[in-house]
Image (cartoon, rainbow, N blue to C red):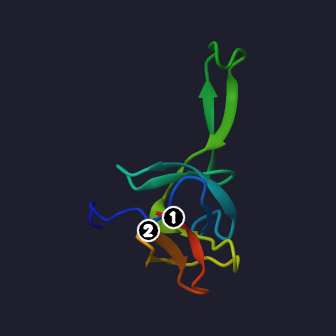
Amino acid sequence: MDEKTRIKIRKDDMVMVQSGKDKGKVGKILKVIPETRKVIVSGINMIKRHQKPSKKHQHGGIIEMEGPIRVDRVMLVCPKCNLPTRTGHTLLSESKVRTCRKCEEIIDNV
């Protein structure tokens, strides 16, 4: 995969996992990591970390948190038709907007 390929999903987008142990689950993107082409999705790819006591985690112990998942394993869910879809771009009055390829509805401004 070309490293210069732009990631077409952003923080706060709803995505559906297309492959792996969480296939079919839907979640909201919490963080995008473009350097490694990964995203962190709420409730997806839950991992456990053994944490020493600190100011943030006073008792320590085993903490469950979301792990990163590759961008090519998730697909944007259109808010209008509620289906996973690819995105297109359309120019509207000097602004570029993302559109759903299935229902041709505007997703949001770019």
For mark 1, what is the residue?
109
Instruction: Please say if 50 is above or below 56.
Output: below
Q: Which mark is residue 15?
A: none
Q: Contact (CB < 8 A) between labels 1 and 2?
A: yes
x and y, in percent, of residue 56 in the image: 64, 18
Neighbourhood count class around disc 2 (C-alpha, 10 Å): few under 14, some 14–19, many 20 upward = few
- Tell me where residue 6 sits by quadrant: bottom left
Q: How many marks?
A: 2
Measured from the top left, where is residue 73 in percent x and y? 51, 67
Q: Quadrant of residue 57?
A: top right
Disc 2, SS: strand
**Would residue 44 appear left or right of 10 to someone viewing this image?**
right
Residue 18 seen from this side? no
Mark 1 / mark 2, whichever is N-terminal: 2
| Residue ID at (47%, 62%) | 71
Image spot of residue 70 (x, y percent): 47, 59
Q: Is residue 9 above or below residue 83?
A: above
Horizontally, residue 34 falls left or right of residue 101, namely left
The amino acid type found where label 1 is placed reads Asn
- Alpha carbons under labels 1 and 2: distance apart: 7 Å
Q: Nearer the viewer, residue 84 or 58?
A: 84
